[in-house]
Image (cartoon, helix red, strand yellow):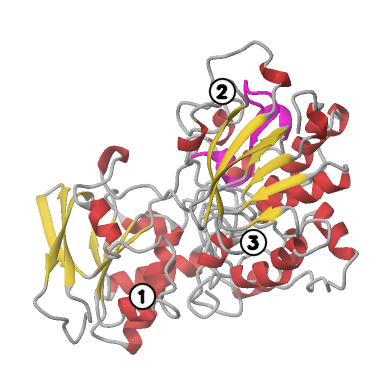
């Protein structure tokens, strides 16, 4: 486009083709604004697919955005049964993939295209004159390594937090040796499929789970189930607190049903001696020990020596795998040239940060919100979805849908619609910072970012009435066979 092209004729860039990103694209379509979606993965919802074995606690009726439903309604898509609880894989195959394939969206999505920088055309962050009327410059790199610049009128960053988990070490820093251990695959993804795809990594091996959330609890439960089939499997659990009882339930601040069943199962594993608990432990060092040859139990030629500080002094022991259940943080590295106003604590937009600080709030106390609360000094640049919550551990998928509805209205100049609240949440059961399980799989895990509520009783589980939380988040998270965590 030429320098005289009106800004309104440029497309709107969306970073990430997850549930919230595709919802944003659908809302742009309804307002006759061209979307341009950049997805780093090979398919829509690539991050969701990474924990596809996890079952969402919330049913389909809370998982589908209204604008997306309208687009799908013009195709041969058959909407899933509203009360059914899908897995992450089903969310992708039965909703996100068909949505991305609609005639209105299929040519708007660039797969395997990573956004590596966002700026203003001809202006770094220090240049102010004419800034609001200057197109954004979005720089991308595709799978072949080709770098390309795109001019757009606005940017909605829904890239999530899946690729930036919190480190294992102290003070928010990686433990010494942690990067090398991750590179070697000895530190796994936050939500491994213990009983399915990743079983060989854990069967007959010694695994350390780090973290005190319910994502950790469900990983431990899955490992406990694996241990029944493979008795040589060893399980260790490291937490920074002095007592694992807080994970067993009874102290929930979300106003949700107690996670009694989950806690009871985990307590049993600990008290029966099946899980070795290391309390008051801060991991300081991960050292890779090369073995001369693969062992019958580990099947690997390396193991980790984990060293940490505890009340009794230095603790050190050997494991085959470490599962980090330590939460996530936003990647802000490619936004260096954008003028952001972020909360200094949780790295969310400044207006939202105090409302979601986990030391003072649960997501059940956060009202639906939109463009005004998410605005930055950089006009028409927004962070939405789970990334908008920064380091806060909980996020509702339904909240993300409301965010992008409002944001798109603001970009379109419809401030009245942007300010209107169109999301009504139940008074109870609206969110969870942790993982529950589905009726179909009592031992399943649910994503922190995707779970709809706490661990239910069998009756509660079969009659859910809450919108899904995302986070891996969140996150939201984790498999129907293995247990139940960007958008």
- Dot 3 surroundings within 10 Å: few (below 14), some, or many (20 or more)? many
User: Where 210 sits versus 149, above or below?
Assistant: below
Q: Nearer the viewer, mark 1 or mark 2?
A: 2
Asked whether 477 falls inside the magenta stretch, the response is no
Residue 44 bears which disc, if any?
Answer: 3
Quadrant housing the N terminus:
top right
In the picture, measured across the screen, residue 298 lies left or right of residue 111, that is: left
Indicate the quadrant where residue 363 lies.
Answer: top right
Task: Report the residue at 56% width, 25% height from top.
Answer: 340
Image x and y of residue 448, in percent = 52, 57
Image x and y of residue 40, in percent = 55, 54
Separation of marks 3 and 1 at Cα, in angstroms: 30 Å
User: Are the residues flagged by discs 2 and 3 in contact, CB closer than 8 Å?
Assistant: no
- Pointer 1 residue: 223
Residue 339 bears which disc, if any?
Answer: 2
Task: Please give the count of numbered marks on the rendered protein.
Answer: 3
In the picture, measured across the screen, residue 415 lies left or right of residue 450, that is: right
Looking at the image, tell me whether mark 2 or mark 3 is earlier in sequence order: 3
Separation of marks 2 and 3 at Cα, in angstroms: 29 Å
Image x and y of residue 194, in percent = 40, 75
């Amino acid at each position: 486009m030429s320098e005289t092209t009106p800004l309104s004729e440029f497309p709107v860039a969306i970073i990430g083709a997850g549930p919230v990103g595709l919802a944003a694209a659908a809302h742009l379509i309804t307002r006759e604004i061209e979307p341009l979606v950049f997805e780093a993965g090979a398919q829509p919802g690539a991050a969701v697919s990474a924990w596809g074995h996890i079952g969402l606690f919330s049913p389909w009726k809370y998982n589908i955005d209204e604008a997306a439903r309208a687009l799908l309604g013009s195709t041969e898509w058959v909407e899933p049964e509203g009360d059914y609880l899908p897995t992450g894989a089903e969310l992708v195959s039965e909703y996100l993939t068909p949505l991305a394939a609609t005639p209105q969206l299929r040519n708007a999505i660039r797969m395997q295209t990573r956004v590596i920088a966002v700026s203003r055309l001809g202006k770094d962050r220090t240049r102010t004159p004419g800034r609001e009327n200057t197109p954004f410059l979005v720089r991308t790199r595709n799978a072949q390594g080709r770098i390309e610049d795109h001019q757009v009128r606005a940017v909605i960053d829904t890239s999530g937090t899946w690729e930036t988990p919190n480190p294992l070490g102290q003070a928010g820093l990686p433990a010494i040796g942690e990067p090398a251990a991750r590179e070697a695959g000895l530190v796994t993804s936050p939500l491994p499929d213990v009983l399915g795809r990743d079983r060989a990594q854990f069967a007959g091996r010694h695994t350390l789970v780090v973290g005190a959330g319910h994502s950790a609890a469900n990983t431990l439960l899955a490992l406990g189930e694996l241990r029944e089939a493979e008795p040589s499997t060893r399980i260790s659990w490291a937490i920074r607190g002095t007592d694992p009882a807080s994970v067993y339930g009874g102290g929930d601040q979300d106003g949700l049903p107690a996670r009694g069943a989950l806690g009871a199962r985990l307590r049993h594993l600990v008290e029966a001696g099946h899980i070795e608990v290391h309390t008051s432990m801060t991991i300081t060092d991960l050292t890779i020990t090369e073995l001369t040859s693969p062992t019958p139990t580990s099947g690997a030629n390396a193991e980790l020596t984990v060293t940490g500080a505890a009340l009794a002094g230095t603790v050190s022991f050997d494991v085959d795998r470490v599962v980090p259940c330590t939460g996530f943080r936003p990647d802000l590295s490619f936004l260096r040239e954008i003028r952001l106003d972020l909360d200094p604590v949780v790295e969310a937009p400044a207006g939202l940060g105090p409302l979601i600080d986990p030391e003072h709030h649960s997501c059940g106390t956060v009202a639906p919100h939109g463009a005004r609360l998410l605005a930055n000094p950089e006009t028409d640049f927004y962070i939405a979805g789970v990334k908008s919550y920064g380091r806060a551990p909980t996020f509702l998928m339904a909240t993300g849908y409301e965010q992008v509805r409002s944001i798109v209205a603001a970009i379109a100049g419809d401030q009245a619609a942007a300010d209107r609240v169109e999301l009504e949440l139940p008074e109870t059961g609206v969110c969870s910072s942790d993982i529950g399980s589905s009726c179909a799989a009592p031992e399943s895990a649910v994503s922190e970012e995707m779970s709809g509520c706490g661990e239910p009783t069998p009756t509660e589980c079969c009659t859910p009435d809450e919108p899904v939380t995302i986070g891996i988040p969140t996150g939201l998270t984790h498999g129907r066979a293995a247990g139940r965590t960007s958008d």
